[in-house]
Amino acid sequence: MEQKELNLAKNNVSPWTNAIEVSIIALVVLVPIAFYPRCVTVFLPAKEMITELLILIALMFWGFKIVQRGELKFIHEPLNFPILSFIFICILSLIWSNSPMVSLKELPLFLAGPLLYFIITNNVKDDQQINHILTIIIIVGSLFGVYGILQYQGIDFSFWTGNIGRQNVFGLFGNVNYFAEYLIIPLTIAVPLFFVSKNKMKKLLLLIGILAMGGSLILTFTRGSYLGFGISLFFMLFLFVFFKGKSFIKENKNIFIIILVAIIIITLLFVIPNPLNKSGTIIYKIKSRISVSQLIQNSYTIKSRITNWKFTALMIKDNPLLGSGIGTYKYNSLRYQARFLEQGQNRSIYPYVFATKTHNECLQLWAELGIVGLGIFIWLIISYFNYGLKFIKRVKNRYKQGILIGLMGAIVAVLVDGIFGFPLHLPATIVLFWLSIGLTIVLGINESCPNKENIVQKYDNEKGKENSDEKNNQTNEANKDEELETNKTKFFLFKALLYLGIILLSVFICVTVTRPFIARIHWFSGDVETKKKNWNQAISFYERALKWDPYLGPMYYNIGKILQNKEFYNLSQKYLEKAAKYVDHPDLPQDLALVYLKKGLLNKATIKLKQAISYQENKKSMLPLYAELGNTYLKLKKYKPAEIVLKDALKIDPDFINAHYGLAGVYLNQNKIEEALVELEKVIELAPDSLEAKSAQNIMQQIAQDKLKFQPTETDNP
């Protein structure tokens, strides 16, 4: 007799449970499609805000449910302790973070996933809820698959023209990699459901969804996602064969034959020269992305990843145990990259990158939370797979087994993709990752204790319980009736206050997590005015942004830069120094150095000039900064450092006039006349018509007149 795909029984479900389910489905639907074009940037801030708001709303409904039942019932499962430990270490890292406000702003997104896990495991109880959620995930993923294929064909909304991405296939994520890292989850879940489903119509719809998502994934040309999905397929196939044996192969023999033939044909299309794999075709592009020879020839991407990983290793070395604080990687990356590129010949070997993520989830976690945080995360993942594999042994329902294998396969795909990307920092992927973990646990709860739902829900009908208790405790004494009514009134008043407290707290937190998004809308308006050179209007918008988010570092930088251009150096210094607390911009040290020079703060200027030199993308852009630093040392009468700096500039460009001219001044101030004359002659030789050459000639004439007894003074400095 054919087994039912899912048990659809649903008993005594609280309205708050239904509200929580709606919130979870809203997460699955709204987060991937959320964007706002008048925001910096268009996609991620909107998705982050929607994620945080909907999880807060679900928590609020859960709070209402607890108040209604009059009891806090917490499901005890093996993953609870590692996930609580992960939440704990994230919060604790605020204490030792080297930028606490940066960490605090990043914390909500890090906590969103673990909180979603607890919402799911404590409120999603029956198979119908699981079926609803998984169906929506696959439908949304399939629609995005179709949209991605249309984008590749150039069929898209006109307002996306020129958006970010290696190709035009970016869905509603703004970046081809982000889109691919989302697609691998619904695609991985859909594949095993296709094999275990007995309903022919459902099987056909799943096949259409798989082809749409798979086709769109191929067109992203994202190697990390290819690898993640490919390994997850082998993992899921192993689980099917291991737990179902030869019966799985026999049941799907025809499908496997079709797949094998397709693999052979595709392989031949790749290997044998033919019109379909000529230059410019899809097959040619895929082959270029995945072939070893092409990877070696086009090594920039690989070297940039290696650059990321190597300077991340320096971060880890400085804070190996507890890390630098959650979310601080982007605050520290430029400084550590500068340190790495200054070592040996690294600057000539490795490319410069401006990275806010390290493109490796484990390395970034280690850098931010130390070996303790990384160890907790690994413990969590091991506990998850240990739980899932034990559960597969017990499950008898064919369809439920397929769901479990799909959920575990999705986790594998994300973890493998996380070796080369950062899927666990992207809102849509975060939601599906933690949802997959949570649903796996729920399936285990239902399988091990089918009646547990009734146990958890037994307090849902609070009114009936109160009426029953009242009947059992009735007495004929009037004074006891009056006391009972008084207690009942107090109880309902207490519940009303709890409801009100939950609502007020939820509203407060929702407003708090919405503020950064509103700030980015004002940021966008400020950038529009900046492009028009309406400086005062731009500052006005940037100031509004800071009212909504006082820790938005780029706003302080933008205002400081405008004030610097308007020569308001005191105010500019204030804003630029404030910016340095919350953001590390590649141009920030150079801008601060200029302000310090204008204000005569020469010692501070030398510090920032040295930092600005180390932040430069290439050696050529270092030259003017070297010259400025040398002249600043000269003004401070620090002749030896000035000589070293200017000689470093000449190592980059032996014909750099400003360096020769500055060296002449250094030697004159140390009464090294012969060395100074050599440098002055070099200036005249390299640029005979320049102002520096004319000044050099005057100095040489004065030296000749004094019969080489010229005593340099401060005013004689070139």
Image (cartoon, helix red, strand yellow):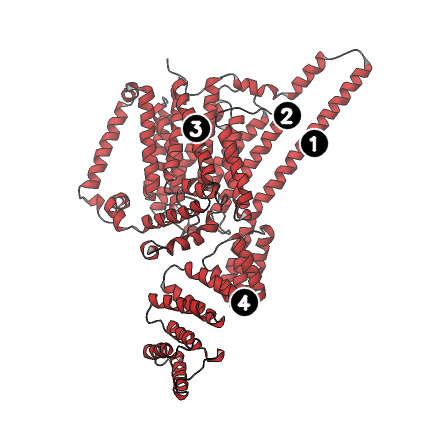
Given residues 93 and 483, the one toward you in this image is 93
Secondary-structure class at tag 1 = helix
Label 4 neighbour load within 10 Å: few <14, some 14-19, many 20+: few
Residue topped by disc 2: 68
Residue type of the residue flagged with mark 4: Leu
Residue type of the residue flagged with mark 2: Gln
Q: Residue at x 67, y 34 (%)?
A: 500
Tell me which numbered mark, 1 or 2, is placed earlier along the sequence.
2
Residue type of the residue flagged with mark 1: Leu
Residues at discs 4 and 3 in contact (Cβ within 8 Å): no
Measured in 3D between alpha carbons, the distance from the residue under mark 1 to the one under mark 2, in whole angstroms, is 12 Å
Mark whose residue sits in front, 2 or 3: 3
Mark whose residue sits in front, 2 or 4: 4
670, above or below 283, in the image = below
Residue topped by disc 1: 497
Residue topped by disc 3: 384
560, above or below 119, in the image = below
Decide if residue 215 is in sight here: no
Decide if residue 376 is in sight here: yes
Secondary-structure class at tag 4 = loop
Q: Position of residue 696 (x, y in %)?
A: 39, 81
Q: Residue at x 60, y 40 (%)?
A: 509
Residue type of the residue flagged with mark 3: Tyr
Taking the image as shown, residue 204 lies to the left or right of residue 38, namely left
Measured in 3D between alpha carbons, the distance from the residue under mark 2 to the one under mark 3, in whole angstroms, is 32 Å
Mark whose residue sits in front, 4 or 1: 4
Residues at discs 2 and 3 in contact (Cβ within 8 Å): no
